[in-house]
Image (spheres, coloured by chain):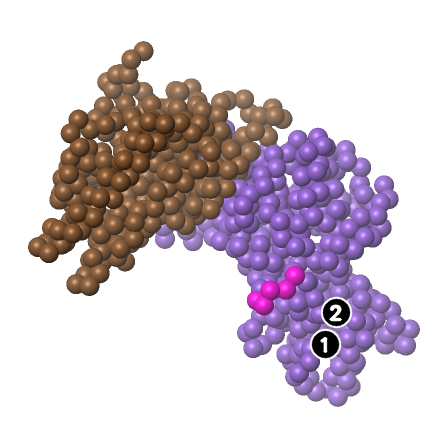
Chain colours: A brown, B purple
Amino acid sequence: MAYNLKEYAKKPERLAGGHRMCAGCGAPVVVRAVMRALEPDDHAVVCSATGCLEVSTCLYPYSSWNDSFIHTAFECAGATISGVEAAYNAMKRRGAIDATTKFIAFGGDGGTYDIGIQSLSGAMERGHDIVYVCYDNGAYMNTGIQRSSATPTFADTTTSPAGSVVPGKVQKKKNLTEIMVNHGLPYVAQTAPMGNFKDITDKAQKAIYTPGACFINTIAPCPRGWRYNTPDLMKIIKLAVDTCVWPLYEVENGKYAINYTPKEKLPVEEFLKPQGRFAHMFKPGNEWMIEKFQEMIDNEWERLQKLAAM
Amino acid sequence: MRERLSGNEAVAVAMRQINPDVVAAFPITPSTEVPQYFASFVANGKVTTEFVPVESEHSAMSACIGAQAAGARTMTATSSAGLALMWEMLYIASSSRLPVTLAAVNRALSGPININNDHSDTMGARDSGWIQLYGETNQEAYDNFIQAVKIGEHKDIMLPVMDCFDGFITSHAVENIELIDDDKVKAFVGEYKPEFYLNNKKHPIAVGPLDLPIHYFEHKRLQAEAMRNAKKVILDVAAEFEAMTGRKYGLFEEYKMEDAEVAIVVLNSTAGTAKFVVDGLRERGVKAGLIKIRVYRPFPVEEIAAALSKVKAVAILDKADSFNAAGGPVFTDVTSAMYGRADGVKAISYIYGLGGRDVKSTDIELVYERLLSIVESGDIGEIYNYLGVRE
C-alpha cells in the first residue's frame, strides 16, 4: 500500500499527550513518528538516556509511554537496551515470554555523540537487535544549552558563547552518522520529521525490522536553544534539509543513498537567519562566518553525493 | 562432590549451575577468570545464558540493570576500578530494586594502580544499597554466591547482592571444595519470576522515572526497609542451605568467643591466619577469640554488639582506610554498634594489608599482644593504628 499520512496517523499513539516537552520541540515529533512505525501488535521496550525526553515523559508516578520504558543514566542507553534485548532472547528461549518485542533507545546528542558514545559503540558493535535513535538538537538543552560535539560551528551556547574575541563554537560538528556507518551496521540513516513524514517513517520501519543493530540520526530543533519562533518548528526543519545543513540519506549494508535532493539548494543564511544562536554571524564584519559555514556544508554535501554515486 | 578449584572457578561453577538468563561482564584482574570460565560454558553449551561481553564495567552494570528489569536473572563479576566505574549504576540497580548478583573479587583501588588485594573497592560501595556478603575461603565464596541469588530475589528484599572474596588469595589459590549437585543448586535458587518486568507485553511498566521531592524520600525509605528485612531472610536462606549441605552460615562467625577476653574482628581470608594465631594463643592459655563478619550490609548491629559485650578489648582490622582521620570503615561500624550496647569494652582500629601487603601470623600476634597490654594497663592508647607499614 502506498504511503498515506492520513491513514498512517490513524495508528494508535504510543507516546501519550500530556507529556512535558516544550511547545515547538522537535523531539516528541520524532518519537511519535518512530513509534508509529511499529506494527500495532508488537510490544516495544523503549530506553531513554537522561535528557529532556526522559525527564518530561516519565515523571513518577506517570509515564507517557504506552509501551514498557526504562531510563537508567545519561551515558548508557546503548548498554541498558542491550541488556533488555539479551534478556528477551534468554527469556524467549526458556519459554517465559512469547510476544514479539522490539527495542528502541532514544538519546539526545549529549547522551549519544558525547557522554554515551562508548556505550552506543559497544552496543552497535555487539550487534544486538535494537534501534538507537539520536534526536540531535545540537547542544545539552536539558541542562541549559551547553555546547556539545554536535553543536554546529559558530553557534552561540552557554559554554561556547559568541563574544568579542571568540565567535561562538569554534570546532566542527562531529559526524556521528558516519561513525555509525563505520561500525559496519546493516542500516544507518539520517532523517528529519518533515513534510508528510514519509522519510522518517520509512527509515524507522526499516531500522526496527532489519535484524541487528541499526542507527537513526534525526534533527530535532529546540526552540529554547536555537531561539526560533516556536510555531516555526516545521519550517526550521525544512530549511535545514533544503540548505543541505541536514542531508537526508541512508546507508544499507554500506551502500549510500541520498533520499532527498532539494529542487533548489538554498543558501545557508536561510537556515541561520531565523535562529538567535546564529545572530552574531549577521553582524557587519562577520560575513566570513557565513562563508565558512557555507563551505563546510557544501563540502559535506559533495562528499555525500560522491558516496551515493559509488 | 569433592573438587579442587580456585575461588574464581568455584564462583563460575556456581554460575553455571544456576544457569542465569544474562551475564554481562568486562575483564579486570583478578576477577577476569569468572567471565572467562563462563564464556567457555556458553561456548560449549553448558548453559543457555546470553553472555554480553560489554565494552566497560559501566556498561556491564547498565546491561545487568536493563536485563534484570526486563525480567532476567542476571549476574556479573568485577574488581577494583571496575567496581568504581560501576559506581553510578550500583545505586541505580539497588534503588530500582533489581536483584543482580555480583562476584566482587576484592582488589585495591587506584591510585596508585595496584592489582593486589585489599577491600577498598567494596568498602567504598558499602552504602550503595547492595547487600554485601564476605567469604574467607573458596568454599564460602561459592556457597555465598548461591545463597546471594536467593536472598536478593526474595520478595521482601529485591536488592542486588555482592559476593566479596579476596583477590588472588581466594580468587586464584586452588583449594579443596565441596560442590553441590547441579540439580540441587537449580532447585535451591528456583526459577526467577519477577512480578513486574519490561518484557511483559500484557503489563508494560516504566522503570527509572524522574522522582521529585514529593515521592523520592518515600522510595528511599522503602529501600532502607528492604535492607532491614534482609537480615532475617539471610538467616532463613542460610538455614535452608544448611539443611541441603550441612554447612552452617550466620551473620558472622564466632571463633572461640565463648570466654574470650580479647578479640579481633576481621573480614575474608585474613580470618584464616587469625584463627591460627588464636589457636596458638589458646595453647598458651590466653583467652583470645575472633569474629569474622560475613554479612556486612545489612550490618548486624545488635548481634555484633552482643558478641563483643563480654570481651575486655577488641581490635577491628580493616583492609581499607577511610581517610577520615579516625579509623577504618569496619571499625567505625562496629564501634557505633557497641555504643550503648557494649560500653566499657576498649576498641581500637588497625588498618592492614593495603595493596596486597602480606599479613603474617606474627602481625596478628602483635595485635593480640597490644590488646592484652590494654587489658593489663587499662590504658587504651592510640585508637587509630596501622599494621605492617613502614613509618
- Callout 1: helix, strand or loop? loop
Mark 1 belongs to chain: B
Foreground of the two, B76 or B44: B44
Residue at 28 percent across and 16 percent down: it is: A3
Q: Is residue A10 above or below residue A165?
A: above
- The disc at residue B388 is 1
Quadrant of the drawing holding the N terminus of chain B: top right
| Whether residue A83 can be seen here | yes
Marking on residue A118: none
- Residue at the location (37% across, 38% down)? A177
Please indicate whether residue B22 sits to the left or right of residue A67 in the image: right
**Do badges 2 and 1 share one subunit?**
yes
In terms of depth relative to the viewer, which is nearer, A255 or B368?
A255
Direction right: furthest residue: B283
State the image coordinates of residue B359 (x, y, percent, origin top left).
Answer: 76, 70
Q: State left or right for residue B306 relative to residue A226.
A: right
Judge whether B192 appears above or below A257 on screen: below
* Residue B223, x across and y down, in percent: 52, 50
Give how far across and how far down residue A275 sits, in percent: 16, 45
Q: Work out whether residue B157 can be spotted.
A: no
Residue shown at the point (55%, 49%) measured from the top left = B57
Give how far across and how far down residue A26 sits, in percent: 25, 37
In the image: residue B121, left or right of residue A231: right
- Give the main secondary structure of the magenta stretch: loop
Which residue ends up furthest to the left in the rendered image? A284
Q: Quick one: B380 or B304, which is closer to the camera?
A: B380
Which residues fall within the magenta stretch? Answer: B111-115
Amino acid, disc 1: Gly
User: Mark 2 or mark 1, which has the lower sequence index?
Assistant: 2
Residue placed under numbered mark 2 in the picture: B358
Neighbour tally class for label 1: few under 14, some 14-19, many 20 plus, Cα within 10 Å? some
Residue A36 colored in magenta in the image: no
